[in-house]
Image: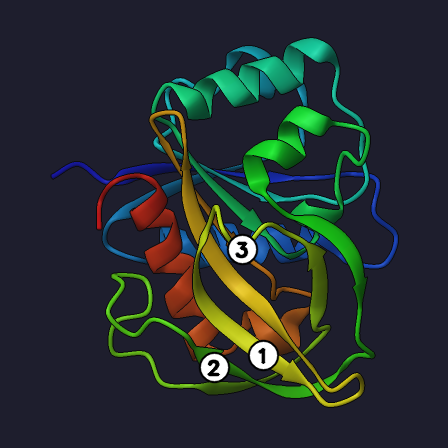
């Protein structure tokens, strides 16, 4: 089987994350695997007319604005079978884009302090999480506006600062395309976590119909 063709699309507007550096790290990491070939881009124009050669698009973005053609190009790509992987601040991006957030089923609603917490596997039989144990991370624990009835939850985490449990990873379909969202990803402390890297690798493959 040919390698999965992945686009790592990174925003340019965020000020609280090193999106470019972290995105380059993720691109290098997946390119070191046996079954993914990844490109890195910060060019918004690719969303309007350059996605067809990719099996999966991974969004590691923050804030930002789409043109109508860019949002339509992305949503058409997914609706017709392309894979979408939203990572961390993808839920905090394009805040006026109702179509994008309808596709994602996730809208940033704050986060915990940067802290240590445990990510619990909700569904250990899914290809993304199969054989994966609960794991500890240092990160922001994200809160989302999210409809749990339209997505399947794969991971969750308990926030001791609020005495609340929040979804950390979920998936659903959008038209013919697969959508996966994973809430971790603030900085290198979590990007170098082996469990995080396993989920990145498997999530990209799953969204692209390879798992």
Give the secondary structure at mark 1: strand
Q: Is 11 left, or right, of 73 in this rendering?
A: right
Q: Residue at x 52, y 52 (%)?
A: 181
Give the secondary structure at mark 3: loop
Q: To which quarter of the image does residue 73 belong? A: top right
Give the secondary structure at mark 2: strand
Which is in the foreground here, disc 3 or disc 1? 3
Q: Residue furthest right?
A: 15
Which numbered disc, 3 or 2, marks the residue that appears first in the sequence? 2
**Residue 135 locus on image (x, y percent):** 47, 86
Marks 3/2: CA distance? 17 Å
**Residue position for label 3:** 148
Could you tell me which quadrant the N terminus lies in?
A: top left
Marks 2/1: CA distance? 6 Å
Q: Answer yes or no: do the residues labelled 2 and 1 have beta carbons within 8 Å?
A: yes
Residue 157's mark? 1
Q: Residue at x 22, y 44 (%)?
A: 210
Instruction: Choose between 152 and 94: the one closer to the eye.
Output: 152
Q: Residue at x 58, y 20 (%)?
A: 47
**Residue position for label 2:** 120
**Residue 15 locus on image (x, y percent):** 88, 52
Q: To which quarter of the image does residue 200 belong? A: bottom left
Which numbered disc, 3 or 1, marks the residue that appears first in the sequence? 3
Estimate how packed mark 1 is, as few (under 14), some (14 to 19) or many (20 or more) residues with alpha carbons within 10 Å. Answer: many
In the displayed structure, would residue 197 be above or below residue 13? below
């Amino acid at each position: 089987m040919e390698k999965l063709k992945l686009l790592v699309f990174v925003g340019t507007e965020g000020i609280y994350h090193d999106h470019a550096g972290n995105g380059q790290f993720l691109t290098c990491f997946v390119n070191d695997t046996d079954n993914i070939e990844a490109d890195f881009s910060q060019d918004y124009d690719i969303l309007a007319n350059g996605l067809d050669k990719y099996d999966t698009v991974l969004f590691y973005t923050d804030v930002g604005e789409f043109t109508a053609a860019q949002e339509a190009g992305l949503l058409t790509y997914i609706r017709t079978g392309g894979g979408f992987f939203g990572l961390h601040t993808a839920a905090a991006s394009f805040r006026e884009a109702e179509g994008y957030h309808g596709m994602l089923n996730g809208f940033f609603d704050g986060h915990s302090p940067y802290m240590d917490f445990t990510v619990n596997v909700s569904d250990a039989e899914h290809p993304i999480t199969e054989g994966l144990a609960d794991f500890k991370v240092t990160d922001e624990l994200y809160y989302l506006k999210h409809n749990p009835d339209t997505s399947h939850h794969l991971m969750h985490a308990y926030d001791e600062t609020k005495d609340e449990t929040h979804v950390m990873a979920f998936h659903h379909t959008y038209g013919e395309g697969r959508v996966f969202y994973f809430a971790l990803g603030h900085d290198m402390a979590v990007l170098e976590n082996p469990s995080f890297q396993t989920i990145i690798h498997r999530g990209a493959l799953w969204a692209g119909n390879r798992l």
